[in-house]
Image (cartoon, coloured by chain):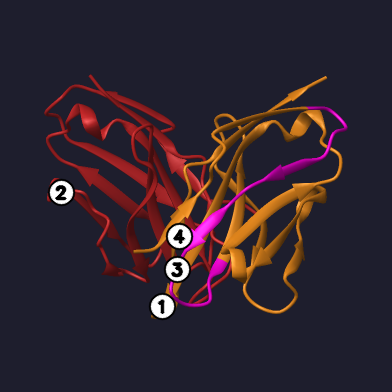
Amino acid sequence: GAGVSQSPSNKVTEKGKDVELRCDPISGHTALYWYRQSLGQGLEFLIYFQGNSAPDKSGLPSDRFSAERTGGSVSTLTIQRTQQEDSAVYLCASSPERTSGEQFFGPGTRLTVL
Amino acid sequence: AQSVTQPDIHITVSEGASLELRCNYSYGATPYLFWYVQSPGQGLQLLLKYFSGDTLVQGIKGFEAEFKRSQSSFNLRKPSVHWSDAAEYFCAVGLFSGGYNKLIFGAGTRLAVHP
């Protein structure tokens, strides 16, 4: 079956613009995670969704970052007024409900802020 | 605070040689431990995981890892490396609480394989 997909694969934007990154999890996976992979900070947790609610947003670095999930499926990570330090690869992962097991990762979106 | 340390940023081995990638963690409770591999331009793929039980766990692609509580380590091993194993390897602790698993990653070890 299809894995986790993310779009776009690459995004170049100018400082100050808003961007939206999309994640399509594996069908039937109710848990969804966003992580950020950057040169300076490594791989960092951003936010967790269970269904459409986000009980853990503790990793969002600032209020310019927000995320939503609709229909218990697709999730969108939005970064407003992008800054150069937002440049990173944004990874999405999904897993079956309430499990301590494997998270299945998408290929990521590489964001470059000029 | 929970943390994961991978002391080796970059390792080079010859094809056919054995491999050990080190991972140390800091976590107050019994950890959920993972090794992921990332090939260039790809997402993360799970190699193996440890939750409980046998401290030597087998994974995909011929990898294994051993959990040593006394050393707070979860080192990844492979007896004979193939050129296709060249990639970046990440050790992670899963903070399983409230029904979900927040992963804390190490900085990664980049593996190069000489023919």
Tell me how far mark 3 sits from mark 1, CA to CA.
13 Å
Q: Residue at x 31, y 50 (%)?
A: A76
Task: Compare marks 1 and 4 and give the one earlier in the sequence.
Answer: 1
| Contact between labelled residues 3 and 4, with CB atoms less than 8 Å apart | no
Residue type highlighted by circle 2: Ser
Q: Which chain is red?
A: A
- Note whether residue A71 is visible: no
Residue under circle 2? Answer: A62
The answer for which chain carries disc 1 is: B
Residue under circle 1? Answer: B97
Residue under circle 4? Answer: B103
Q: Which residues are magenta?
A: B14-32
Q: Which chain is orange?
A: B
Label 1 crowd (10 A; few <14 / some 14-19 / many >=20)? few
Which is more foreground, mark 3 or mark 1?
3
The answer for which chain carries disc 3 is: B
Residue A62 in the image, given as x and y percentages of width and height: 15, 49
- Number of callouts: 4
Mark 1 and mark 4 on one chain:
yes
Residue type highlighted by circle 1: Ser
B22 with respect to A17 (left or right): right
Compared with residue B38, is residue B23 higher up or lower down, i.e. above or below? below
Residue under circle 3? Answer: B27
Residue type highlighted by circle 4: Leu
Which is more foreground, mark 4 or mark 3?
3
Q: Secondary structure at mark 3?
A: loop
